[in-house]
Amino acid sequence: MKTGEHRHAREGAGAVSSRVARSFAGHLGAIVRLRGASRLRLEHPMTARLLGDARLGTLSQQYSRWLRSNGRQPAAEPAFSRFLRQLRSSDRADLADLAALEEARSDVALEPTPRPIARDALAGLAFGPFLASRLEFVSALRVLILGHDAMALWRRVSAGLPPDPPDPMTTVAVVWQSGPDVLHARLDFDEGLALETALAGDSLVHVCAAFGRSEDPAQTAFATLSSWFEEGWISAVLPPSGTVGSAA
């Protein structure tokens, strides 16, 4: 063959290869975007529903770049809520709190099945040892301090209702396993403080002190502690001298 024919063949092949490469890159980019969006949709279903497919796809690309720039891996830690917090033009002021709530729900779902104990574990303790005792909690429990009521937003999005405008307010949320389900609830400030105090390993005298502002602190503390047992949050009672009532 003549040199020109070879050259023409090369140019033609090169042009085809360039088109194929661009097409492949486009398809690959679309696959990566879809995978990123699918992962976010799986881990943050209500956040994804609120955003919509187009906006979720855009944010998933920005999130991937943010992860790479910060040296993080998507599976290493729940970071989407942190990404949303630092985003300069967030879609909603409460979007990051909703994402944080869903990250806690996903995290709790991966914990081993809880083995809680019943309230009668306290029955054998006298008043003094009771106040000096500490509580040990199941691993499938998380407490969040949020800047908005993400539970109300989650509820409306889950029900297919239009969300209310963001309302800045400090909110305490608790997320836990209950049988096959993952539940969450909003706590009032006193109970949130008491639960944080107990999770930090402080004795019950300090835990109960969180209810000092209520009309009947003793009754409020007793009712709250009872509810923690009933919800299956407590795995052991640790008196000063050792452990009683721990789950076998």
Image (tube, rainbow, N blue to C red):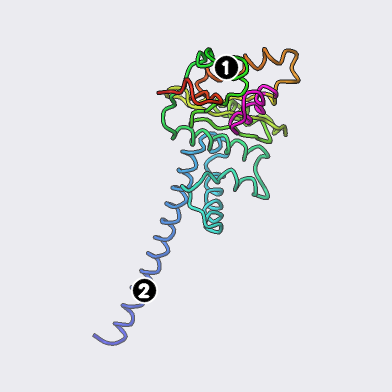
State the extent of the magenta-drawn residues as a range.
Answer: 191-209
Q: Can residue 162 be seen in this view?
A: no
The image shows residue 213, relative to residue 54, as above or below, that is above
Indicate which disc, 2 or 1, sits on the residue closer to the N terminus. 2
Q: Is mark 1 on a helix, strand or loop?
A: helix
**Residue at point 29%, 82% (across, down):** 6
Q: Does the magenta stretch include residue 193?
A: yes
| Picture coordinates of residue 153, whole percent (x, y) | 62, 30
| Picture coordinates of residue 61, whole percent (x, y) | 53, 52
**Residue at point 66%, 23% (across, down):** 205
Q: Name the residue under label 2.
A: 14
Q: Does the magenta stretch include residue 33?
A: no
Q: Mark 1 points at which residue?
A: 227
> Where does the C terminus fall, quadrant-wise?
top left
Quarter where residue 167 is shown: top right
**Residue at point 29%, 87% (across, down):** 3
**Residue 138 vs residue 159, the one in the foreground:** 138
| Picture coordinates of residue 103, whole percent (x, y) | 53, 38
**Residue 98 vs residue 131, the one in the foreground:** 131
User: Of all residues shown, which one is farthest toward the bottom?
Assistant: 3
Q: Is the magenta stretch mostly helix, strand or loop?
A: helix
Amino acid, disc 2: Gly
Amino acid, disc 1: Ser
User: Of all residues shown, which one is farthest toward the left?
Assistant: 1
Mark 1 Cα-neighbour bin, 10 Å: few <14, some 14–19, many ≥20: few
| Picture coordinates of residue 68, whole percent (x, y) | 52, 57
User: Left or right: 188 with respect to 238?
Assistant: right
Query: Is there CB contact under 8 Å for labels 2 and 1?
Result: no
User: Left or right: 114 with respect to 127?
Assistant: left
Q: Is residue 74 visible?
A: yes
